[in-house]
Image: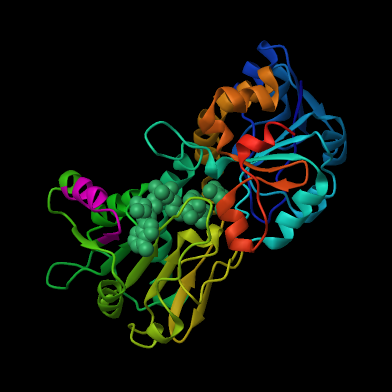
């Protein structure tokens, strides 16, 4: 199979879909790997690194899309990339379709087979291709929130850990999954007073066990979050209902009850965001203010640490990328129901129910798609 990896074109996105290691494995398995020139530079990989791995360097994205049977990327395809997809081509990348009707319409129109990293599952109920980036975004969340809290950035002027004689900041984390746990680890390490809310009591028990009393756990009811938001310096949104649009957990009216200069870090923004007033921002212009409360809503946070993120993502995607290339998408998905769970669009049909529900569109099951 010809596997193509274009350079990412989303603003300030420095990750790349294939590492030289992944390219080397694909070439060893008998595939042809096409990498757009300079695609890896932002993550510290040169064209020569890819050439040494046996890949061919191609001058333009157009040529990659025209020649490749499978496109491997990081971010959802941008409008110009969507126009280049064609029936029968495989697209393997993050999609986040539930909050994105335009992208969904374009992917349906393309006729391509689109497998979303974020809905591939594993045997333990996890999301193995989302988890590495959630680890990164979770670790970054208190760091970017702490930066936003600095006075020069519009924040309250509060230091997360306080100092002797001055209380630390209150950090509230909504959602105690991969992002929430990683965020808690860093926020606790920075000396903040941390509360984590989740709807899963087993998950709260796990957090209670691993943090040995260094944070407070709380069942995520609307009333509990409203109460905690009032005294929070930072609220980190880290909820997920896989594939679906994020539930809105803090309303605009509630912002008036929050401390002026407090910050909302909405990591769940790629699924539409879990605060009513969230809208996606970029690394170039990451924060904005509504009713005195700062919002940090960057939808590709891991792009800020592109080298770490590219390596972590590449480790996780490699076995699935190889299965798709070795067997073709149909056999690879038929053999592995966890990879099949990643199928979101095939031949003009939506194949992921939660996306259909979020967008009011009809969908078929991924199993049915295997027969088309
Ligand atoms: N902005 C960015 O750059 C990035 C965003 N993300 C996003 O972060 C979000 C979280 O991802 P993960 O931690 O990997 O998901 P996860 O599935 O590991 O954890 C989500 C947690 O949310 C909990 N939850 C669901 N509804 C809730 C509610 N109403 N209140 C409290 N908790 C609730 C679940 O029980 C679960 O424990 C996703 O939307 C993901 O796409 C992930 C990586 C990068
Ligand atoms: C998960 C995701 O969307 C990202 O890493 O950008
Ligand atoms: Mg994202």
Q: What range of the chain is rendered magenta? A: 196-208
The reply, left or right, for residue 105 in relation to residue 142 is right
* Residue 66 versus residue 156 in the image, above or below: above
Residue located at (60% from left, 38% from top): 43
- Residue 61 lies, in percent from the top left, at 82, 40
Q: Quadrant of residue 252?
A: bottom left
Residue 20 visible here? no
Count the labels in the image.
0
Q: Quadrant of the N terminus?
A: top right
Residue located at (24% from left, 62% from top): 219
Q: Nearer the viewer, residue 82 or 10?
A: 82
* Residue 310 versus residue 305 in the image, above or below: above
* Residue 52 versus residue 306 in the image, above or below: above
Q: Nearer the viewer, residue 198 or 166?
A: 198
Q: Quadrant of residue 248?
A: bottom left
Residue located at (64% from left, 31% from top): 18
Tell whether position 179 is magenta.
no
Specify the principal SS of the magenta part. helix
- Residue 269 lies, in percent from the top left, at 52, 62
Residue located at (37% from left, 47% from top): 178
Q: Quadrant of the C terminus?
A: top right
- Residue 42 lies, in percent from the top left, at 64, 42
Q: Nearer the viewer, residue 181 or 366?
A: 366
Color style of the picture: rainbow
- Residue 298 lies, in percent from the top left, at 54, 61
């Amino acid at each position: 199979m010809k596997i193509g990896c274009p350079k990412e074109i989303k603003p300030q996105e420095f990750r790349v879909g294939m590492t030289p290691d992944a390219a080397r494995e694909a070439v060893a398995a008998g595939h042809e790997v096409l990498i757009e020139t300079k695609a890896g530079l932002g993550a510290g990989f040169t064209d020569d690194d890819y050439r040494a791995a046996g890949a061919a360097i191609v001058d333009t994205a157009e040529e990659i899309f025209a020649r490749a049977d499978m496109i491997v990327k990081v971010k959802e395809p941008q409008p110009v990339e969507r126009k280049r997809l064609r029936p029968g081509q495989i697209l393997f990348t993050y999609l986040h379709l539930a909050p994105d009707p335009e992208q969904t319409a374009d992917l349906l129109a393309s006729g391509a087979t689109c497998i979303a990293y974020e809905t591939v599952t594993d045997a333990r109920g996890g999301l193995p291709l989302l988890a590495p980036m959630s680890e990164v975004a979770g670790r970054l969340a208190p760091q970017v929130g702490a930066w936003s809290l600095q006075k020069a950035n519009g924040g309250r002027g509060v230091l997360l850990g306080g100092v002797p004689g001055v209380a630390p900041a209150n950090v509230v984390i909504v959602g105690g999954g991969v992002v929430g746990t990683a965020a808690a680890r860093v926020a606790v390490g920075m000396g903040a007073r941390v509360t984590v809310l989740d709807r899963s009591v087993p998950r709260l028990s796990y957090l209670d066990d691993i943090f040995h009393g260094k944070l407070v756990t709380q069942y995520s009811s609307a009333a509990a979050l409203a109460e905690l938001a009032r005294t929070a310096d930072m609220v980190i949104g880290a909820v997920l209902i896989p594939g679906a649009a994020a539930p809105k957990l803090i309303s605009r009216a509630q912002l008036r009850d929050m401390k002026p200069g407090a910050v909302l870090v909405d990591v769940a923004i790629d699924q539409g965001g879990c605060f009513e007033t969230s809208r996606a921002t970029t690394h170039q212009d990451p924060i904005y203010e509504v009713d005195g409360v700062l919002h940090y809503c960057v939808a590709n946070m891991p792009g800020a640490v592109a080298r770490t993120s590219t390596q972590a993502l590449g480790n996780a995607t490699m076995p699935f990328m190889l299965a798709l290339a070795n067997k073709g998408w149909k056999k690879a998905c038929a053999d592995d129901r966890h990879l099949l769970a990643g199928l979101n669009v095939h031949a003009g049909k939506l194949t992921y129910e939660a996306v259909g529900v979020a967008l009011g569109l009809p969908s078929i099951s991924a199993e049915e798609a295997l027969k088309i």
